[in-house]
């Protein structure tokens, strides 16, 4: 679970910092830089799974097949010199991990900070690459963890998610003041033996991205956590496809394998009832298993008795069904990034899909367990209808900032939200967003009368009563209810 991210020198993020809760929405107009935050998260994920150069290419093309100018990853400023990319992430890892050989191990501690610094390099023959400058993986003491997490959580959640302790870092970097070269030291979990020494400048991969055995379980746990971060891109063709008997019974990032996942879960009634909150005409969701053709097909039955196969269902219905299935799947863990969940959904049903996304995320009021997996949801949107159905603690706003005669992106927190009390809070990295600025955002997009739902009278009330401060909004109320 990603709790904090600071990004420097990456695309439009010259120095941006974000604190995340279980469910977070990044709002902003098109072109405001919302997707750059997702790109930074997925870049870390790809660094944990691929070589540095391949991870860089995957920022531009998720398949990693299209090559391009590596300089586009680095922040452009009025100075012709490219800054280094530096990313710092705080996250909670699983209390048990499995290595590449199926062996299970327990990390020394589950609350960690990972830092990486990368530099753009081009030689005399104009061959470009990205050089690893520094890498660190350190523990975060439990004594300060509550303040660093920031969002409200119960004692049961805190004690079940944050376990173990550690007095020494797992990965550190030393720089030679004369040559400028860096050496990365990798320590054992038990503090026994001399740390391994790795020269950074010629390393094709990160140290964390090379961990694959149970010899260093905490480094492996950090890698597994990053590998679990994904961008959910539900493709209609994948959502509609039947499954073969050999298919993995887990929904993939593109929405494939709903039938196999449903059959594994066998929670048809619960999932059917959840889908019916968005589509009241739905009676039941089921799977037809054809033993002759050896395929599994998704079926949806309406209250009038008509049964439809997946291929005849709308994109919006299938998207909601995929999300509902994932919400009931305890094996679906990690961080889920989801762009514009309102697509394909009628504005009157926006609140239903937001409620489902909230339910998908871990509940911080109870202990982490098989029924409450450590799952996190981050969405982005440019829809004022979505924003009006959020509470201030769930919302961040992508805002432009000016620095050195250039424009960059920051992610502003709403006044009086918990993010502004974080011990690392900086108004430069995380600007405050007032209600007036939020109202300006809500005004910035034309809303048709049929879309003006779920609190669409916000600016009318503001005009009648004058601008109000978020101190007047009770905690837990949606922005749109005032």
Image (spheres, grey):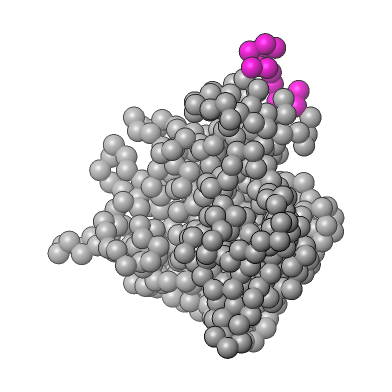
* Screen quadrant of the N terminus: bottom right
Q: Is residue 167 above or below residue 336?
A: below
Residue 342 percent across, percent down from the top left: 56, 45
Q: Is residue 181 visible?
A: no
Is residue 95 left or right of 405 when viewed as pictured? right
Residue 393 percent across, percent down from the top left: 69, 39
Residue 70 percent across, percent down from the top left: 29, 57
Q: What residue lies at 27% left-to-right and 59% top-to-bottom?
A: 68
> Is residue 469 shown in magenta?
yes
Q: What residue lies at 51% left-to-right and 38% top-to-bottom?
A: 382
Q: What residue lies at 35% left-to-right and 50% top-to-bottom?
A: 74
* Screen quadrant of the C terminus: top right
Pick the residue in front: 338 or 35: 338
Q: Is residue 81 above or below residue 236?
A: above
Which quadrant of the structure image shows residue 204? Answer: bottom left
Is residue 239 left or right of 475 when viewed as pictured? left
Pick the residue in front: 220 or 452: 452
Secondary structure predominantly adopted by residues drawn in magenta: helix
Which quadrant of the structure image shows residue 286? Answer: bottom right
Which segment is the magenta one? 460-473
Residue 200 percent across, percent down from the top left: 40, 69
Pick the residue in front: 85 or 275: 275
Is residue 240 left or right of 80 when viewed as pictured? right
> Is residue 240 shown in magenta?
no
Is residue 42 left or right of 201 when viewed as pictured? right
Pick the residue in front: 320 or 29: 320
Q: Is residue 480 visible?
A: yes
């Amino acid at each position: 679970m990603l709790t904090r991210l600071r990004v420097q020198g990456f695309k439009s993020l010259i120095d941006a910092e974000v604190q995340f809760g279980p469910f977070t929405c990044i709002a902003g107009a098109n072109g405001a830089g919302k997707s750059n935050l997702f790109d930074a998260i997925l870049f870390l994920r790809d660094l944990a799974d691929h070589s540095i150069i391949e991870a860089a290419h995957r920022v531009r093309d998720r398949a990693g097949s299209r090559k391009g100018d590596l300089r586009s990853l680095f922040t452009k400023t009025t100075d012709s010199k490219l800054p280094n990319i530096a990313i710092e992430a705080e996250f909670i890892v699983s209390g048990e991990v499995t290595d590449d050989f199926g062996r299970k191990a327990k990390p020394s501690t589950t609350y960690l900070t990972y830092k990486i610094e990368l530099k753009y390099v081009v030689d005399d023959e104009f061959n470009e690459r990205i050089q690893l400058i520094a890498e660190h993986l350190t523990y975060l003491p439990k004594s300060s963890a509550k303040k660093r997490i920031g969002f409200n959580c119960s004692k049961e959640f805190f004690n079940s998610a944050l376990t173990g302790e550690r007095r020494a870092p797992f990965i550190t970097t030393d720089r030679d003041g004369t040559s400028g070269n860096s050496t990365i030291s990798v320590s054992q979990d038990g503090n026994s033996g001399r740390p391994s020494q790795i020269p950074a400048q010629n390393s094709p991969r990160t140290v964390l991205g090379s961990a694959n055995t149970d010899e260093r379980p905490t480094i492996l746990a950090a890698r597994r956590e990053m590998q679990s971060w994904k961008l959910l891109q539900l493709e209609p063709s994948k959502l509609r496809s039947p499954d073969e008997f050999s298919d993995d019974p887990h929904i993939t990032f593109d929405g494939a394998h709903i039938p196999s996942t449903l059959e594994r879960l066998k929670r048809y009634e619960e999932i059917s009832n959840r889908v019916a909150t968005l589509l009241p005409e739905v009676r039941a969701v089921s799977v037809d298993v054809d033993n002759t053709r050896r395929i599994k097909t998704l079926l949806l039955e309406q209250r009038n008795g008509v049964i439809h196969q997946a291929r005849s269902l709308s994109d919006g219905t299938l998207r909601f069904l995929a999300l509902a299935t994932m919400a009931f799947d305890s094996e679906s863990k990690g961080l889920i990034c989801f762009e514009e969940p309102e697509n394909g959904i009628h504005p009157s049903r926006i609140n239903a899909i937001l409620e489902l996304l909230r339910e998908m995320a871990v509940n911080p009021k109870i202990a982490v367990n098989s029924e409450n997996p450590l799952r996190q949801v981050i969405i982005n949107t440019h829809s004022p209808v979505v924003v009006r159905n959020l509470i201030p603690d769930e919302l961040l706003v992508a805002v432009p900032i000016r620095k050195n005669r250039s424009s960059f992106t920051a992610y502003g927190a709403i006044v009086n939200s918990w993010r502004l009390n974080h011990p690392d809070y900086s108004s430069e990295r995380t600007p405050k967003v007032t209600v007036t600025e939020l109202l300006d955002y809500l005004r910035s997009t034309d809303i048709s009368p049929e879309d003006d739902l779920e609190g669409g009278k916000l600016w009318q009330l503001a005009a009648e009563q004058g601008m109000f401060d978020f101190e007047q909004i009770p905690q837990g109320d949606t922005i749109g209810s005032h």
